[in-house]
Amino acid sequence: MTIRRILFFCMGNICRSPTADGVMRAKLAAAGLDVEVDSAGTHGYHVGAPPDERSQEHARKRGYDLSPLRARQLVAADFDRFDLVLAMDGDNLAHAQRLCPPSRRQRLKLLLDYAPHLGQRHVPDPYYGGAAGFETVLDLVEAACDGLIAAELRR
């Protein structure tokens, strides 16, 4: 399958998934790859809101601009529109599996499936923690985006 559109998702679409969205956009641009990227949340708590200020701050320090992004909710049509629909953790993956038509389930994966060398499957939610949590998210997302580009887009 040719990957032309990738969607990242977490619960509220203000920390982890917009971070993945911004990191992936930058990495794709640097690699000269033309792939559409978006992010969403399984819950509509923050629809229309920009990414969490802490996510933006930590991303900015690494050269990623998350400021144009706005939260939206994951919808059933996303499974038709996107070639890969990547969850940040197992709880949100399970939520999406209930929404996803059976014929599209092969498109659903965990983002960290693309970074098996890290030895973890879930990107932890940094929302209720301190600065270290946002740095951890960036570390995990950067590694997984590199792995995704190598595995799926550099064929």
Image: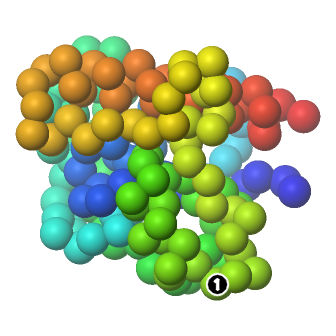
Q: How many discs appear?
A: 1
Q: Is residue 51 above or below residue 154?
A: below
* Front residue of this view, candidates 90 and 80: 90
Regarding residue 35, the answer to whether it shows in the image is yes
* Amino acid found under the numbered disc labelled 1: Pro
Residue 78: x %, y % from top left: 55, 74
User: Which residue is at 41% across, 19% downward?
Assistant: 139
User: Which residue is at 16% across, 60% downward?
Assistant: 49
User: Which residue is at 45% across, 53% downward?
Assistant: 90
Q: Name the residue under label 1.
A: 101
Q: In this view, does 61 lie above or below 29?
A: above
Q: In this view, does 155 lie above or below 49?
A: above
Tell me if 60 is positioned left or right of 145 in this view: left
Quarter of the figure with residue 55: top left
Residue 47: x %, y % from top left: 21, 69
* Front residue of this view, candidates 24 and 108: 108
* Front residue of this view, candidates 90 and 131: 90
Residue 140: x %, y % from top left: 45, 25
Quarter of the figure with residue 21: top left
